[in-house]
Image (spheres, rainbow, N blue to C red):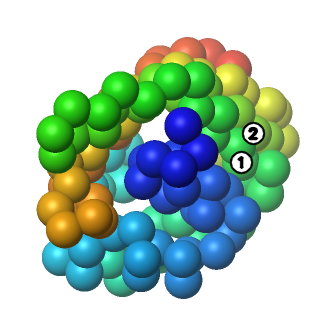
C-alpha cells in the first residue's frame, strides 16, 4: 500500500512536502476534486495542498486499501483533521472532522496523470459546522 503512487502522493501532501509531487505526478496532471479544489497542472495541485495544510495543519489521509489494475490505482481513504482556517468555502471553526474518500488515479509512465477525488463532504459540513 505505502508503495502505491496514490499513498505516496497523499502522504507527501499531508507532510507538506509538495516538492515530492514532482516524482509522483505528471506536470500536466489533472485532478478532479470537490469544493472547487480541482487543478489543471502540477503547480496548481501543489498550491491546493499548501492551502489545505495551512488551513488543516493536522491533515491526515489514512489509506485503508489500494486496488491496482493495469494503469489504474483506486484507494479507499479516511481523511481527518481540524479545520483551523477557512478552506474550500468552509469557515475555519477549529472543529475536527473525519470523512470517507475514494481516489481514482490513472497512471502513465510511472506517475499519476489524472485523478478523481470523491469525498463525503456532506459529513465534513456536519462535523465542522460551516
In the rendered image, the vertical position of residue 105 relative to residue 40, given as above or below: above
User: Residue drawn at (71%, 48%), measured in percent from left and top?
Assistant: 59
Left or right of 120 in this view: 86: right
In the rendering, at what x and y percent does residue 58 appear?
Answer: 80, 50
* Quadrant of the snapshot with the N terminus: top right
Query: Which quarter of the figure has residue 33?
Result: top left
Depth order, front residue of 2/117: 2
Position of 33 compared to 61: left or right?
left
Q: How would you rate the neighbour count of disc 1 (Cα within 10 Å): few for under 14, some for 14-19, many for 20 or more?
A: many
Q: Nearer the viewer, residue 89 or 52?
A: 52
Q: Residue at x 72, y 63 (%)?
A: 15
Graded by Cα atoms within 10 Å as few (under 14), some (14 to 19) or many (20 or more), the crowding at tag 2 reads: some
Q: Above or below — where is 103 with respect to 38?
A: above
Residue 93 in view of the camera? no
Which residue bears the numbered disc 1? Answer: 59
Left or right of 95: which side holds 4? left
Residue designated by label 2: 81
What secondary structure is marked by label 2?
Answer: strand
Gap in angstroms between the C-alphas marked 2 and 1: 4 Å
Res 97 quadrant in image? top right
Q: Which mark is residue 87?
A: none
Q: Nearer the viewer, residue 35 or 65?
A: 65
Q: Is residue 129 left or right of residue 95?
A: left
* Label 2 with label 1: CB-CB less than 8 Å: yes
Indicate whether 14 appears above or below 118.
Answer: below
Say which residue appears at 62% left-offset and 40% top-offset.
Answer: 61
Amino acid at each position: 500500500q505505502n508503495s502505491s503512487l496514490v499513498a505516496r502522493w497523499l502522504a507527501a501532501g499531508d507532510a507538506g512536502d509538495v516538492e515530492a509531487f514532482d516524482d509522483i505526478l505528471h506536470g500536466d496532471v489533472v485532478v478532479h476534486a470537490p469544493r472547487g479544489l480541482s487543478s489543471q497542472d502540477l503547480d496548481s495541485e501543489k498550491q491546493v495542498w499548501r492551502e489545505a495544510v495551512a488551513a488543516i495543519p493536522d491533515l491526515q489521509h489514512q489509506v485503508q486499501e489500494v486496488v491496482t489494475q493495469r494503469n489504474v490505482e483506486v484507494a479507499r481513504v479516511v481523511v481527518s483533521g481540524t479545520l483551523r482556517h477557512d478552506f474550500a468555502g468552509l469557515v475555519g471553526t477549529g472543529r475536527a472532522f473525519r470523512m470517507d474518500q475514494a481516489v481514482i488515479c490513472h497512471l502513465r509512465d510511472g506517475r499519476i496523470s489524472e485523478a478523481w477525488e470523491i469525498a463525503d463532504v456532506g459529513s465534513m459540513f456536519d462535523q465542522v459546522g460551516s
